[in-house]
Amino acid sequence: MKYQLKHCVGSRLRRLSRIADGHIRQILGDFKITENQMTILFTLHELGKVEQGKVGEVLCLERSTVSRNIKLLEKRNWIFRTTSYRPQIELTEQGIDLVKVLIPEWEKAMDVLVEHLREDGLQSIKNLEARLG
Amino acid sequence: MKYQLKHCVGSRLRRLSRIADGHIRQILGDFKITENQMTILFTLHELGKVEQGKVGEVLCLERSTVSRNIKLLEKRNWIFRTTSYRPQIELTEQGIDLVKVLIPEWEKAMDVLVEHLREDGLQSIKNLEARLG
DNA sequence: AAATTCAAGTTGTATATACAACTTTTTAAA
DNA sequence: TTTAAAAAGTTGTATATACAACTTGAATTT
């Protein structure tokens, strides 16, 4: 065999992302929100009012994934969506408040991850991003 | 802010694994099987007859994920499961045949990924594994 | 040996993801 | 301007994943 199973890039990256998500979920436990949804809220916090598609573009998420998440976030009154055919999305005040509470929690999770990864590990992620696109 | 959103380790690793999986899915398209299921078949090919739990242990997959995948693989007659309370799993002949066909295809995907990653990128993955566990 | 505890497996529920099919609206082409 | 093509959004279907609750058989304790 040219490669061994344990070298499989796909399953290894899948596993790594599960581990990282686990750390984030731990600090998110109390907030009834998922990592992915948190990331979308943070994105909207940075971008302000944008087209729904912009979110997927920035986070490299599939349209359908964004669509379903937006629906969930809207139901929880964290985001507002214009009714136009191609809706503009933005955080509601409740959404902004939540983001402000979540940021320090997210930073705690990042602290843990960065402590594990060190400068070297962070550079490794950058390297992978540069190489895989 | 101590960190920027774009530094979020969780979403970045999630994204990287989606990209890698995409490459693997491309070559798997014709085979009506998923990356994850393929990985389980390969694992069984290496391990021979094992307890179901062993698969999850090796691949760091949750019990319920393994349980459902095993059921799918059994339905397709690629694996055989003993009826004991804690079943032993092994590939069927059809499963072995499939693995033999899949290996060269998987190697093609690995070639593409390794070409992108280079020695440096592979080292980066190892580094992350060492640091994240 | 009976009772308790533990470990593995299964199932329910919710979200994440991919991809295909479809709708709607815009843009481009004729 | 009418038509064709493209782009964005939605929905259906299937798998992946996490976590909790439950089941069952095994191991340990009393």
Image: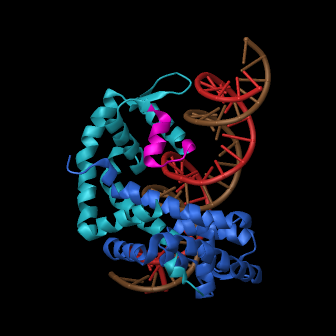
Chain colours: A blue, B cyan, C brown, D red
Determine the image quadrant of residue B64: top right
C3 w.r.t. B17: above or below = above
Q: Which residues are magenta?
A: B51-64
Residue B41: percent from left, percent from top: 37, 40
The residue located at (20%, 50%) in the rendering is A2
Residue at x 58%, y 77% (from the top left corner): A52
Image location of residue B125, percent across then percent down = 36, 64
State how many labels appear.
0
Residue A84 among magenta residues = no
Where residue B60 appears, as percent x and y from the top left, is: 48, 49
Magenta stretch: residue B52 in it? yes
Residue drawn at point x = 72 percent, y = 79 percent: A101
Q: Position of residue B106 (x, y in %)?
A: 28, 51
If the image is split into quadrants, where does the N terminus of chain B sit?
bottom right
Is residue A68 at all visible to an observer of this figure? no
The vertical placement of A109 against A94, above or below, is above
The one of D30 and A42 positioned closer to us in this rendering: D30
> Horizontal placement of B16 versus B99: left or right?
right
Relative to residue B10, is residue B81 depicted above or below?
above
